[in-house]
Amino acid sequence: MPVPALNKKMEAEKRSVTYNNKQITYYLTRKRVKNINLHIRANDGTVQVSASKYVNTGITDNFVIDNGAFILRALDNYQKEQSKKSRITLNAITDGSRVLIFGKELTVKFCYDNIKKVDLNEEYIIIHSFDNHSKTYDDWLNETRISVYTQAIDKYLPLFINFCSCRPQLIIKHSVSKWGYCNIAKNVIMLNKQLISTPLPLIEYVALHELTHLIYQDHSPSFWKAMEMVMPDCRRRRRALKDYSFLL
């Protein structure tokens, strides 16, 4: 039975198949496409398949079954990301909530005193403040972002100094789709606020990635060759960054 599609402009047919004794539900949308396309939505984990109206549903069912192993892995990763996201506080903090700093899950602990500072250990992030602990934490987080991101850029900037007229301006903001970008025309490099939640090697990877765009504006083999000359394990770091996509 057709169900309302997630895309308001179209209707999708909800279908189910079985792969390795596990049921896979997918939504089939008819489009003007040559091939059968598979997409797993990052925001809700639904399996989306698009195909021409001339393609029989038996063929799309078999297509999903043929890709069953990939789909189940992707859905398992989605559930793991949702589980981690439910544990981590991304907005206002409270005493006892969990935050992610430099790839470590830490428990927030409020400490009431006249000194405003933030301490970290292997288990806790201790926020010292007389009253507004959240503001103390936000101020510390912003200062830490500026310091860490600037150091990451400074580590590699000397390699690119001949490719920019002056030091690129660092902009720190939240993006729902990018960890960073390089605007050559404006001589600007943006790094995502949420990067501070990832391990330092991944922050450095994004910084180098955007600096390399001062030379190569695409992701051509030449771009990756230049990256690997400076950071031989850049592709491994790139894959590791995907584990933190739930932060976007």
Image (cartoon, rainbow, N blue to C red):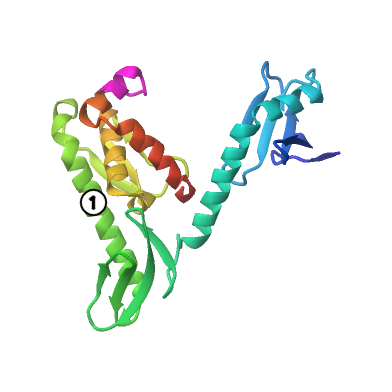
* SS at circle 1: helix
Residue 174 horizontal/vertical position (percent): 41, 49
Please state which of residues 188 and 35 is positioned toward the viewer in this rendering: 35
Q: Is residue 81 visible?
A: yes
Residue shown at 13% from the left, 34% from the top: 158
Up the image or down, 139 lies above or below 221; here it is below
**In the image, is 71 to the left or to the right of 130?**
right
Asked if residue 7 lies left or right of residue 130, the reply is: right
Q: Nearer the viewer, residue 127 or 160?
A: 127
Count the labels in the image: 1
Q: For the magenta stretch, what is the residue range?
A: 215-225
Where is 155 relative to 109, above or below? above
**Which image quadrant: the N terminus?**
top right
Residue 247, image x, y percentages: 45, 50
Q: Can you see residue 186?
A: no
Residue 46, image x, y percentages: 66, 42
Does residue 216 belong to the magenta stretch?
yes
Residue drawn at x 24%, y 41% as measured from the top left? 169
Query: Which residue lies most toward the front here?
Result: 20
Residue occupying the far top of the picture = 34
Q: Is residue 80 one of those drawn in magenta? A: no
The amino acid type of the residue labelled 1 equals: Val
In which image quadrant can residue 6 be found? top right
Look at 65% across and 32% down and name the residue there: 68
Residue beneath disc 1: 148
Looking at the image, residue 59 sits to the left or right of residue 99; the answer is: right
Q: Quadrant of residue 34?
A: top right
Rate crowding at label 1 as few (under 14), some (14 to 19) or many (20 or more) other CA atoms within 10 Å: some
